[in-house]
Image (cartoon, rainbow, N blue to C red):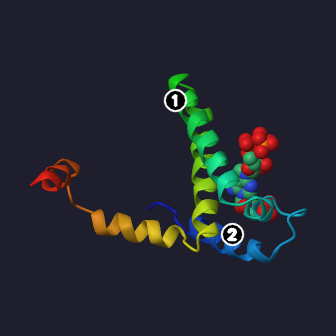
């Protein structure tokens, strides 16, 4: 069984950091910088993920994907969303083949 509780705990922390001091909290400092800067971090982490994959460095790939997920969660929280919203979307898509879904777009 995959432990997704850790994602829920981080989500709670991200909400709590909305009231934190940006000098004492990395997350709060990102909120203070705003959407453009948070998006820049997401893009950086996506690029670093690609580089780790191309280097075939498995441990580094896990670090970078963790950074990417983390900064994506910060972006969601900054917009009043959370991992729960993403999990709900996964549930909605569950069992729908990507190939069938793509075909249905043009039908
Ligand atoms: N999971 C994380 C997490 N993952 C990565 N990071 C930080 O993300 C930052 C950016 O990573 P980079 O690799 O880009 O580091 P960098 O090159 O030094 O950054 P730049 O100078 O380029 O901006 C680093 O400072 C990491 O420490 C995280 N910071 C916080 N968390 C979680 O968020 C919680 C709240 O954090 P604070 O708000 O800082 O208390 C923590 O308790 C953790 O659970």
Outermost residue, left side:
107
Tell me if 89 is positioned left or right of 6 in this view: left
Instruction: State the mark number for residue 9.
Output: none
Kindly identify the residue that appears in the image at 51 percent across and 29 percent down.
Answer: 53
Closer to us: 32 or 63: 32
Mark 1 crowdedness (10 Å alpha carbons): few <14, some 14-19, many ≥20: some
Outermost residue, right side:
23
Tell me if 37 is positioned left or right of 106 in this view: right
Q: Looking at mark 2, is its residue's CB closer than 8 Å to ligand 1?
A: yes
Q: Secondary structure at mark 2?
A: helix
Query: Where 39 falls versus 29 (above or below)?
Result: above
Closer to us: 59 or 97: 97
Q: Quadrant of residue 107?
A: bottom left
Q: Quadrant of residue 19?
A: bottom right
Instruction: State the mark number for residue 53.
Output: 1
- Specify which label sits upstream in the sequence, 1 or 2: 2
Q: Quadrant of residue 90?
A: bottom left
Kindly identify the residue that appears in the image at 58 percent across and 56 percent down.
Answer: 72
Q: Secondary structure at mark 1?
A: helix
Q: Position of residue 84 (x, y in %)?
A: 49, 72
Residues at circles 1 and 2 in contact by the CB criterion of under 8 Å: no
Kindly identify the residue that appears in the image at 45 percent across and 66 percent down.
Answer: 86
Q: Disc 1 versus disc 2: distance between alpha carbons?
A: 28 Å
């Amino acid at each position: 069984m995959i432990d997704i509780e850790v994602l829920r705990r981080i989500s709670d922390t991200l909400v709590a950091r909305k009231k934190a001091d940006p000098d004492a909290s990395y997350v709060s400092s990102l909120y203070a910088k705003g959407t453009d800067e948070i998006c820049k971090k997401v893009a950086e982490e996506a690029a670093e993920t690609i580089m780790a994959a191309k280097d075939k460095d498995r441990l580094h790939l896990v670090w970078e994907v963790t950074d990417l997920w983390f900064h994506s969660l910060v972006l969601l929280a900054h917009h009043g969303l959370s991992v729960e919203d993403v999990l709900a979307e996964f549930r909605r898509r569950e069992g729908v083949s990507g190939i069938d879904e793509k075909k249905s777009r043009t039908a």
